[in-house]
Image (tube, rainbow, N blue to C red):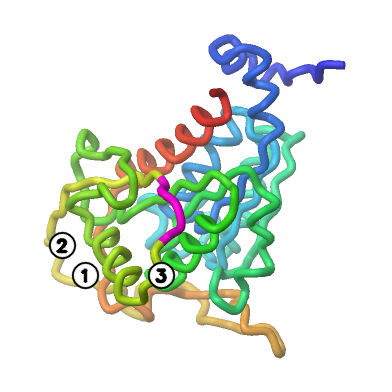
Amino acid sequence: MEEKISPIFRRTELLLGPEAMGRLTAKRVIIFGVGGVGSWCAESLVRSGICHLTIVDSDRVCITNINRQLMATSQTVGLVKVEVLRERLLAINPSAEVTAMQKIFTEQTADSFDIGSYDYVIDAIDSLKDKALLIEMACRSKVKFFSSMGAALKMDPTRIQVAEFWKVKGDPLARALRRRFKQQQRLPQRKFLCVFSDELLQNKGKNATCGTDQCVCPKAVRGPGDPTLLNHEWCSSKAQINGTLAHITAIFGFMLAGLVVQDACK
């Protein structure tokens, strides 16, 4: 018996058709990193009909997140990002299965995520080392994998585009990843699509780093005998904080979601 589609998605089903809509609602998706890019990707997926979504991030909402992250408001500062985002996503579709994991993807925790159990893996990680590891693992599995390159230091939305990883041009993060893969002689085992922009601006503000007097994030806290970071404040660990804009990070996230929807509806 065909499952009845929720009235929430009548307009989506009108465009996609009932068969494609049924496939979309059955897909399982995991997003690593729900900051400026990942949070908008999660919202777009749930509004499009994805009903099985896992969101992974170790961070709490910082006041400096408000300019670009979906769940960041003056009322949510200090709260766990994945929990705040899950609450919003369930307000959109109460019937959705949204799993919030306050964890960080690292070499120590990677195997705990069971990547192969998902249909789609979305990479919105900032850390070069952890991002490279996720790319390697996802490309060894059979899951569909899409990755976001750097969304900071951009302003022109018309320059955001999609390309296969080895054909991405003008993006420092992609360049650093390719250099790392070649130096370690551990190339991804298959091709995958990336969202990126070839625009690269410079910070114009006097202070491009987040001072401790301005950042309200809690410091890193580890669980007893557990290498997983329970609460992680990223500001003090970065040599420089780069400027970002909401319309750029949101478009990156929406394009990642669009790749999932497009692929699921083929």
Q: Earlier in the sequence, mark 2 or mark 3?
A: 3
Residue 227 occupies quadrant: bottom right
Rendered image: mark on residue 186: 3
**Mark 2 vs mark 1, CA separation in Å:** 7 Å
Q: Residues within 10 Å of mark 3 (few under 14, many from 20)?
A: few
Q: Residue at x 71, y 88 (%)?
A: 224
Position of the N terminus by quadrant = top right
Q: Residues within 10 Å of mark 2 (few under 14, many from 20)?
A: some
In the image, is residue 36 above or below residue 64? Answer: above
Please name the residue that numbered disc 1 is placed on: 208
Query: Would you say 195 lies left or right of 28 here?
Result: left
In the image, which residues are magenta?
188-192
Please name the residue that numbered disc 2 is placed on: 203
Name the amino acid type tagged 1.
Answer: Ala
Q: Earlier in the sequence, mark 3 or mark 1?
A: 3
In the image, is residue 70 above or below residue 216? Answer: above
Q: Position of residue 88 (x, y in %)?
A: 62, 43
On the question of residue 181 being in view, the answer is: yes
**Mark 2 vs mark 3, CA separation in Å:** 33 Å
Q: Residue at x 24, y 37 (%)?
A: 157
C-beta proximity under 8 Å, tags 2 and 1: yes
